[in-house]
Image: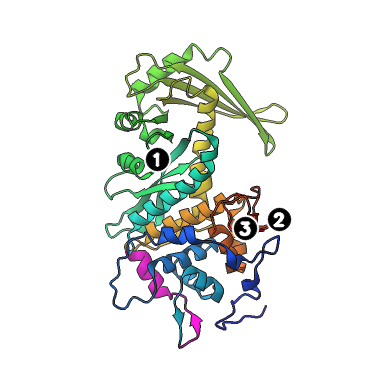
Amino acid sequence: MPFCHHACCSSIRDAGATRGKQGEDLRDADISGLMEMLAEVPEFRGAQGREYALSFILAVCIVATLAGAKNYREIATVAAGIPQSQLRLLGAGFYHFGNCYRHPRRTSIWTVLTHVDAAALDRITGTWLLAQARKYRDEGGEIKWVIAIDGKVMRGAWTDENDQVTLFSAMLQEEALTIAQVRVPEGTNETTQVKALVKETGIRDGEKALATLDAAHCNKETAKFIGGKPGWDYLITVKTDKPALYRKAAEKLRQLLGGTPDDVMTDRSHGVIKTWSCWTAESGEINFPHISQVAYICREVCGLAGEKISKDTVILVTSAAREEMSAADISKHTREHWGIENKSHYIRDTVFREDHNQSWKGNGPRALASLRNLATGLFRMKDVNSIKEATEMVHLDRMLALHYMATVRDNRYAVLSANGPGCRRPAGVFLSWPV
């Protein structure tokens, strides 16, 4: 494969000529919405000696992350291969002496990502992703968000105090978009950051939301805050480390377990049959803030011949009344809560090798995680099934990143390619080049 670093060429042959199914040129992709969002990130550098706009460097970092870059060096390597036409679209300044648009070097990328206001970057990108999801939801009438809340330890990033960096995030279950992320202060744990995280989600007044949390967050302070927030409800797992609550909930449910479940869901896949059975009961006099229902879910896994493989059970409490959340809803939201592990944390660890990344200086770990959340969200908005495959395709052709960065929603536009890298959403969603 020939390589060329001429000012008007990409290092990948024909990269600048990438076209969609109907022949549309990706250089016409409208990425203005994303660029306007990046322009909101606060500038921390002085005017003197500033070589590149902050939004341009961040846009280059997004292209590199979409191409699977895992650290500062890989981001710089991808940046060096971005075609001239794409650099112009990203906002690069023209270098007259070299007759070309220049890409940022590794030192510039490192300086920006380690010193940028990572909290503001999380807030701005999360709010923007929620706005994109809201565009799609607005057609469906009343909006009710289901938000999975969970923490993630960045095992390769150690602080000066010999502690690991922990990030606490909120993800929309249905869309798999991370809409908020906060860093857990050293010396504390994620249970102390629920209020801060919920406030960062950007859910509007009048919209309804259900927060799903694991057993680590089963405490009265969290339940009181979420259950008392207008329009919000919680669904929390209860374990035996809360003996009083667990015992009272079990007593409410015990008399129902011999009868027919309120909901049964069966799934046959990967050579096994999984059955989720759910029973619910009114909470009665249980002393827990805003509690309305208790639920018991039994998950059985059997072979195709009917032989039992495994069985596990869980008890949950929720502030949602039965008329607002049925047993089927409780079972569904409990299963999908772990999407935050499978669709977010797992992707960051396997595709972007986050746990192996030893970047630790300044705001670098959080800024890199924010870029990964945004890149994953851009893939999800195109309904990409295999993010690993999509990053490999973008790595081969940097211009393909514009397909994912374009998010204007218009029914006149069509999907890049029906057989493209993981795309399966119908025409007319989150795209921006005309047929």
User: Residue at 66% across / 64% down in the picture?
Assistant: 24
Question: Magenta span covers which residues?
Answer: 97-115
Q: CA distance from mark 3 to mark 2?
A: 13 Å
Task: Count all numbered tags in the image, as a single digit.
Answer: 3
Name which quarter of the figure residue 318 lies in.
top left
User: Residue at 50% across / 27% down in the picture?
Assistant: 330
Callout 1 crowding tier (Cα within 10 Å): few <14, some 14–19, many ≥20: some
Nearest to the observer: residue 177 or residue 107? 177
Specify whether residue 78 is in view.
no
What percent of the width, then of the height, locates residue 343? 53, 46
Which quarter of the rendered picture does the N terminus lie within? bottom right
Secondary element type, mark 3: helix
Q: Which mark is residue 203?
A: 1
Name which quarter of the figure residue 282 lies in.
top left
User: What residue does disc 2 label?
Assistant: 419
Callout 3 crowding tier (Cα within 10 Å): few <14, some 14–19, many ≥20: some
3 or 2: tag closer to the N-terminus? 3
Q: CA distance from mark 1 to mark 2?
A: 35 Å
Please tell me whether residue 412 is drawn above or below residue 24 in the rendered image: above
What percent of the width, then of the height, locates residue 297? 52, 25
1 or 2: tag closer to the N-terminus? 1
User: What residue does disc 3 label?
Assistant: 389
Is residue 352 shown left or right of residue 284?
A: right
Name which quarter of the figure residue 150 lies in.
top left
Specify whether residue 133 is in view.
yes
Callout 2 crowding tier (Cα within 10 Å): few <14, some 14–19, many ≥20: few
Please tell me whether residue 392 is drawn above or below residue 290 in the rendered image: below
What percent of the width, then of the height, locates residue 246? 39, 22
Residue 357 located within the stretch drawn in magenta? no
Q: Nearer the viewer, mark 1 or mark 3?
A: 1
